[in-house]
Image (cartoon, rainbow, N blue to C red):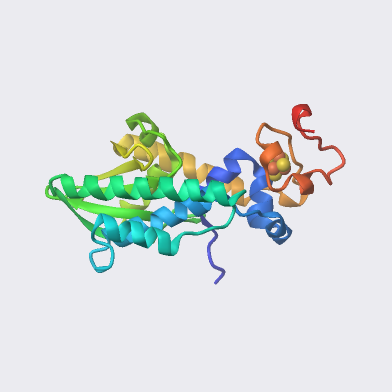
């Protein structure tokens, strides 16, 4: 039996931003030759790796601020920075972020226990399997399950943004099948400002989200990729695939970017 297609929040977000970008990223293997390293991916992954270790109760190597900063230096990913200066500046910022995060966690009263760090979950939605990698799951004293996602680029976060975030809603949808009898909430921690916002989708909102996501997934999986035509948009000038799209006879970059 053929394996079901899988979709993730990042695949769906890419499709919503630009279907042609989805095509070059996930459908046509030629696209991978055009992908460039991004400093913000390197920065985010470096921070995620350290926070994962700090919150992992089985990892005894990163339990203090000093150990967290040392772990960041050791596992720092250098790819994608435009200069050594830029990278050193980002490393200094990363150290400050890690310090602030660890200090905040140590200062706050313990009302929840981390039960999962960095794990891939899946849920079969019928036409496709929805997958999502969660940064962390905490279990609160009242039994509530809290999904936590770290954002290294954001300066701040509001409850409404968490509520409308496709990835956070997807994680709630997936985990409802894994924690059937629990209330599930989702939180984003904006690491640069060390702030956090939490939201929850009720039954009606979740049903509406599931229906929207299933329709969107069907649209992606049944798209006629052989006849995909790029449509110019604001993000084209900074897109890795513009050289490929420019090979299309009718495609032109927006005037200001030429
Ligand atoms: S260059 Fe523009 S149209 Fe082409 S993939 Fe990128 S964003 Fe989409």
Q: Quadrant of ligand 1?
A: top right
Q: Between residues 245 and 66, which one lies in front from this camera angle?
A: 66
Total numbered labels placed on residues in the image: 0
Side of 84 relative to 186 (left or right): right
Residue 138 is at least partly visible in this image: yes
Residue 225 appears at what percent x and percent y?
71, 50
Residue 216 appears at what percent x and percent y?
54, 43
Q: Between residues 137 and 108, which one lies in front from this camera angle?
A: 108
Residue at left offset 36%, top offset 46%: 96
The quadrant holding residue 207 is top left
Residue 196 appears at what percent x and percent y?
30, 38
Q: Quadrant of the N terminus?
A: bottom right
In this view, the residue farthest toward the bottom is: 1
Q: In the figure, 246 relative to 1: above or below?
A: above
In this view, the residue farthest toward the top is: 256
Residue 179 is at least partly visible in this image: no
Q: Between residues 125 and 34, which one lies in front from this camera angle?
A: 34
Side of 63 relative to 24 (left or right): left
Q: Quadrant of the C terminus?
A: top right
Q: In the figure, 184 relative to 128: above or below?
A: above
Side of 228 relative to 50 (left or right): right
């Amino acid at each position: 039996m053929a394996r079901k297609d899988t979709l993730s929040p990042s695949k769906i977000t890419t499709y919503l931003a630009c279907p042609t970008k989805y095509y070059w990223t996930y459908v046509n293997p030629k696209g991978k030759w055009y992908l460039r390293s991004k400093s913000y991916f390197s920065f985010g992954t470096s921070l995620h790796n350290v926070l994962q270790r700090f919150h992992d109760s089985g990892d005894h190597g990163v339990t203090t601020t000093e150990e967290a900063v040392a772990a960041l230096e050791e596992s720092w990913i250098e790819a994608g920075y435009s200069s050594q200066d830029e990278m050193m500046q980002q490393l200094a910022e990363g150290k400050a972020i890690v310090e602030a995060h660890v200090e905040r966690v140590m200062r706050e009263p313990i009302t929840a226990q981390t039960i999962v760090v960095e794990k891939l979950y899946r849920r079969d939605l019928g036409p496709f399997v929805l997958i999502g990698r969660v940064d962390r799951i905490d279990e609160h004293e009242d039994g509530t399950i809290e999904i936590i996602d770290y954002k290294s680029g954001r300066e701040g976060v509001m409850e409404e943004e968490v509520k409308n975030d496709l990835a956070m809603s997807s994680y709630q949808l997936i985990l409802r099948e894994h924690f059937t009898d629990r209330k599930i909430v989702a939180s984003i921690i904006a690491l640069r400002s060390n702030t956090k916002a939490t939201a929850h989708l009720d039954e009606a909102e979740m049903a509406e989200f599931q229906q929207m996501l299933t329709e969107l997934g069907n649209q992606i999986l049944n798209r006629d990729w052989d006849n995909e035509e790029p449509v110019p948009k604001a993000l084209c000038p900074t897109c890795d695939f513009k050289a490929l799209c420019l090979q299309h006879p009718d495609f032109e970059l927006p005037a200001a970017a030429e």
